[in-house]
Image (cartoon, helix red, strand yellow):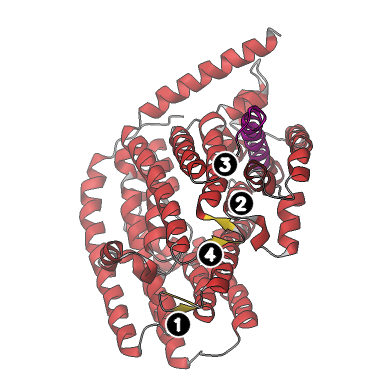
Amino acid sequence: MKKYISYMRCGFLEGCAYRGNFITGMLANFIQVAVLYYVWKSIFKYQGVVNGYTWEIMRKYVFVAFLCNSSFSFGFEMNTAKRIIKGDIILDLLKPVPYRGMLFFRMLGTAGMEFGVTLVLVGGLYLSVNGMGGISGGRVLLFFVSLFLGMGIKFGIQYLFSLLCFYTDNSYGVTKAREVLTNFFSGALLPLVMFPGVLRKVVEVLPFQGIVFTPCSIFIGTFSMEESLWRIGGQAVWIGVLWVCGTLFWKKASGVISLYGGREMRKWRHYLKMYGQIQLQNMKSLAEYRADFLMMLFFTGFSQICNLGVLGIIYSNIPAVGGWTLWEILLLYSFLLFSEGCINFFFQGTWKIAEMINLADLDRFLVRPLPIGLQLLTARIDFDGLNKMGIAAAVFVLGVSHCDIRWSLWKIVCLGVFLVECCVIRECMIWIASCASFWMESGRNSLNFFAVSIGEMAKYPLVIYPPILQGVFAYVIPYAFVSYYPVGYLLGKSGMDGGVMAMPVVCGVMVWGAVTVMRRGIGRYESSGN
């Protein structure tokens, strides 16, 4: 047991050492909670009860679901894939500790740190909003039992998905699949009782509900004490099932290990030509990981279907949110998704900046006769970007067909300009967040994830948020210029002219900020050990 305790201690110390990443990651998740909070608040203004949930119950559910989903939030698929590709996995197999046990106790140590911090923060926020009403000692005890069992289910699912990396040799598609399935089917986005009949029956026989929905329902009192005990028993059974499945899958997956030893105007015309050639090589490299590539495409599409499903479920209960109909919000969603897809396909290398700085991979870029920014942008490509842009186009056409937009040549030109400006603004936000790694000691940077996650706010009209958040998203983190202002202008809504006129200025400021941060970061880069 001493060995396992040592791994738990290492995980705890690792979580404390990289607490900046944990905090920014938690803030990113909190942004999503804030979005759901204000969306549901707007919904319950129109309708007092939705599928048996009142605003008082839903308010509790949102906070408790955040606590449950934040526990054991660190996935380990990417780390597993890297160790497989580099051949380091053999070092784990030589240790006198089972591989699964090593992962579990290491993650348990990290989870202990993040759970303690999250419990204090969310608990304080919960009490300040909901008070002590309805909290009983018995339910609290059952809640924590259910929560810890839910963490066991979450680990079992993560472990099974991490073993897929032995076959895919990559982790992006695997991680995407696990995140999409877990978030949608666990009840993290909305209570499972709001799912339509057939889908709800499917969810009832899957283990995901034990991660969020079951502990939440126990705490807020929608489950009786007897049903709570049955649900806890069901969680324990699922842990056993996942453990057996993991054991059988490990025997199969560990048999395919192979050690690789590592995989790793004329001037502007030349740069553009080099950009195309580098991206072509990236495509060929990505084609080598066919299984992961296919999983990535499928679950990218599935995640967007889930997001659209959430919108559909919400709007099946009310006609509008903040004065915006479902079809108008689909236009917001399409702008946001198109800019995300554009970045994924054309400029995905932005996400590798932190890793390249930490591993000193930036050295080889500095000695090449090409701008370092161009090389960083083309360091990676993801075909799911094309998938997202295609879905965004389909959603846009669907939304436009149900909206009364008076099209003219001017508005068509504005649409093209808006899309370019949206992509530039969003890419610059992620670029600046990624370049913060020059000032960080960690090889991980959660600021770029935070910059993307905060975009959840942009899926809904700005008017549903309180004035302070409206100011933040208009002037500090300018997501309002990515979807709200351009779509509002196309729809002819009042008060949008000023925001649209400011978009070129915002673009210029963001580009200047991105260039400045990169130059200053390169100036303090110290190669290995940075």
Mark 1 highlights which residue? Answer: 219
Q: Which residues are magenta?
A: 407-431
Q: Position of residue 61 (x, y in %)?
A: 49, 75
> Are the residues tagged 1 and 4 within 8 Å (C-beta)?
no
Instruction: Give the CA separation, mark 2 to mark 4.
Output: 35 Å
Residue drawn where x is 63% and y is 10% of the image = 270
Q: Amino acid at mark 3?
A: Phe
Mark 4 highlights which residue? Answer: 12
Q: Which one is earlier in the sequence, the residue at label 1 or at label 2?
A: 1
Q: Position of residue 67 (x, y in %)?
A: 51, 71
Instruction: Give the secondary structure at mark 4.
Output: helix
| Depth order, front residue of 157/440 | 157
Q: Amino acid at mark 2?
A: Ala
Instruction: Give the secondary structure at mark 1.
Output: helix
Mark 3 highlights which residue? Answer: 335
Left or right of residue 523: residue 425: left
Mark 2 highlights which residue? Answer: 458
Most common secondary structure along the magenta stretch: helix
